Image: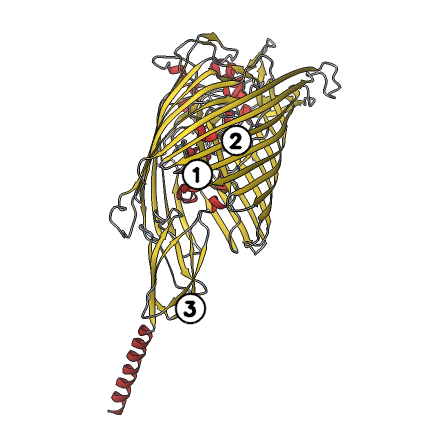
Amino acid sequence: MNRKIHSALLLTILILTDLLLVAQQGSISGVILQQDEKTSLPGANVYLKETKIGTMSNASGFFELTQVPAGKYVLVVSSLGYRTTQHAINVDPNQNPSLTIALTEEASSIGEVMIAGEKGLREIAGSVQYISPRELKKFAQTDISRVLRDVPGVNVQDEDGWGLRPNIGLRGTGVERNSKITVMEDGVLIAPAPYAAPAAYYFPTMGRMHAIEIMKGSSQIPHGPYTTGGAINLISTPIPDELSAKVHLTAGNYGFRNLHAQIGNRHEQFAYLVETFRYQADGFKELDGGGNTGFDKTDYLVKFQWNTHKDAKVYQHIRFKLGNASEVSDETYLGLSEVDFEQNPFRRYAATQMDRMTTNQQLSALSHRITLNDRFEINTTLYHTQFTRNWYKLSHAIDSAGNKLSLGQLLSDAEAYGETLSGEGEPTNHLFVRANNRAHQTLGLQSVASYRSGNHDWQLGIRIHRDEMDRFQWDDAYRIANGTMFLQEAGKPGTESNRIETASAQAAYVQYQFTYGKIKFTPGIRYERMQFHKQDFGKNDTERLGIDLKENTNRVDVFIPGAALHYQFTEQWSGFAGVHKGFAPPGSKEGTLPETSINYELGSRYFNRAVSFQGVYFLNDYQNLLGSDLAAAGGEGTGDLFNGGEVLTHGIEFEAGFDLMGFFGNAFYSLPVRLSYTFTDARFQNTFESEFEEWGSVQKGDVFPYLSRNQAAFSLGYELPKLQVYWNARFVDAMQSTPGQGEILSADLIPAYWVMDATAAYQLNQYMSFTVSVNNLINQTYLVAMRPAGLRPA
């Protein structure tokens, strides 16, 4: 009996204790919003510092922490791409706080961006796109081509299947080596020699980027020097607000491995970031006789910042950025003949076994920001880059009669030259592999002053820039027997292309925005003064003594005006229109004219909590379009620009996104849908004999080559607080490899194709997540190009 009484008493005490503890507990709830304080932010981490109590915001940005013991806490809210915030919270069982917390995008506060995040793009009088950190995280792509295919108005030609050397154009400008667009990293020109030789084999590593901005139309006036199609600004990882470390490991088929690691911290007056990104693969192409066809690329990046106290009367910071990127890839210029492509599209000929690209890029940037008051700010950057590369690749062959055979000629008669390419049959002594050795460097200073006063916003910028490209190349002679190549005679450096091209530029722009009620009017003008100089030492002057020196000089002064109008019909719906002058530098070749055009756009956009939309009609009227004689485009590889005549390009860009569950209040999950579509029509407006052999005789009405008429992308997601699943499909319409009109001939046809990707991610806790991704879900093999030489798969 006593034992039963004792047990009952103990049970009573435990129940009373639990009830007492519950009575001393409270809860915290609230909504997480983006910085516009209108758009919910799902998937944000919400936790109490120095405890294990935490959760994630749901599809409507709502969160709730329950059974929190009474007391004082620090509530931490963080989300990828946003500044982490901390809030002092007092949990009282009788008062359960409900909070509304708006997070500021990191990109909008680092002083290296043009649009200032998702909020900023809604207010710009022009066509712009912003790919946020959340969007980049969905598929975690290392291939910039796959990322940009979802953006309307962007034209991409794949080449190597990994995105190492993308070919990107905007609004039908041409895609050859990104030579017709302005490419920046953190607001600074990043091409190895953007004025003297823009078509280079370097593009910043996509996998380490934090966000991407794409500016088209009159919104690109501040950027230059290429203002026809647009500008792309890649935003690198910002310095974190608190001690933060990240390690991301990926493994996949074809021997793909990826390591992305970073650590950083911010103190009161000092901050730093150290980051590395390495990815490599064995390759998916099959070299005759076996061998590696992959790559190995490694980036290192450090940032240091010193700043005044936040409450200083005049805030300043100085930031130093230092980076190094190196690459070794076993890639070739030589594609396949049509017969061999049909048999095995992933084959690589034995004659390309020596082909290898080695590159190294070094960058340094010193930036200074001073905020004199809440109206006036100046950002100044001194930058320097060095880029060296040597693409050692099969150049040509010599037949038994002593005739030089280009790669295109070798492929055109597979029956006659098949054994030369495969290394079978009788030994061949006449394969020549060229060391395409080049060195680039840039040095520049740019400064932008911004002043805001009431309805008036002014922006004034200057840039002083110099860049250089040094070619010093040679050919090595090889013998191939039984599928193996043997060096017969090493060439002397400088006995092939042996020249230096330099460019110096001084640029300035002013852009003004006047706001009156619902109207924003934004006129601007850019001035560029450029001097180009080429020194060709010839093949016999390897010491560069000037005994056979040929020099070219070209000078250009140009004003680039533009204006845009933005009207806010309602709080969610706005329209815009713009007109500006398109321009691209002519290079050093005498007689080459600058690329000039008049560009128009008319568009509308709509945003609310669940739906976003933007539609744009554009028209680019070229008085003179420039083409590039690149080996990558099937040319001789001189790099010279040539006049391409009059071209009229017009099209439609459309994108929409909405959450199917966003209409139902505090939905537990999200079903985000996104759709983009681009229609582009570009046609020559005159008849002429092109200086570029691949174009040949161009007729009025011929369509521009390597430009898909229709492109579309569609994605669907399923988002829970800890689980996200996404599916994406992209369509690229048929295009032709040479100018022409009417039905595309089979010899010039690059067929239409679909590509589908899928990914799933699970957030185990606030420190760890797991992701599974499948690129090319339906395992489709498709033709992406007939250049540089031959058919290329992806």
Q: Is residue 342 above or below residue 75?
A: above
The answer to whether the residues at label 2 and label 1 have Cβ atoms under 8 Å apart is: no
Could you say which disc has been placed on residue 510 in the image?
A: 2
Tag 1: Cα neighbours inside 10 Å, few (<14), some, or many (≥20)? Answer: few
| Three-letter amino acid code of the residue under disc 1 | Asn
Foreground of the two, 136 or 28: 28
Mark 1 or mark 3, earlier in chain: 3
Colour scheme shown: secondary structure
Give coordinates of residue 547: x percent, y percent.
75, 15
Tag 3: Cα neighbours inside 10 Å, few (<14), some, or many (≥20)? Answer: few
Which residue is labeled 1 in the image?
455
Distance between mark 2 and mark 1 Cα atoms: 17 Å
Give coordinates of residue 219: x percent, y percent.
45, 31
Q: Is residue 729 above or below residue 734?
A: below
Q: Is residue 258 left or right of residue 45?
A: right
Foreground of the two, 106 or 37: 37
Residue 583 seen from this side: yes
Which residue is labeled 3 in the image?
72
Q: Mark 1 against mark 3, which lies toward the viewer?
A: 1
Give coordinates of residue 428: x percent, y percent.
59, 18
Distance between mark 1 and mark 3 Cα atoms: 44 Å
| Three-letter amino acid code of the residue under disc 3 | Lys
Q: Secondary structure at mark 1?
A: loop
Q: Residue at x 48, y 17 (%)?
A: 625
Q: Secondary structure at mark 2?
A: strand
Distance between mark 3 and mark 2 Cα atoms: 51 Å
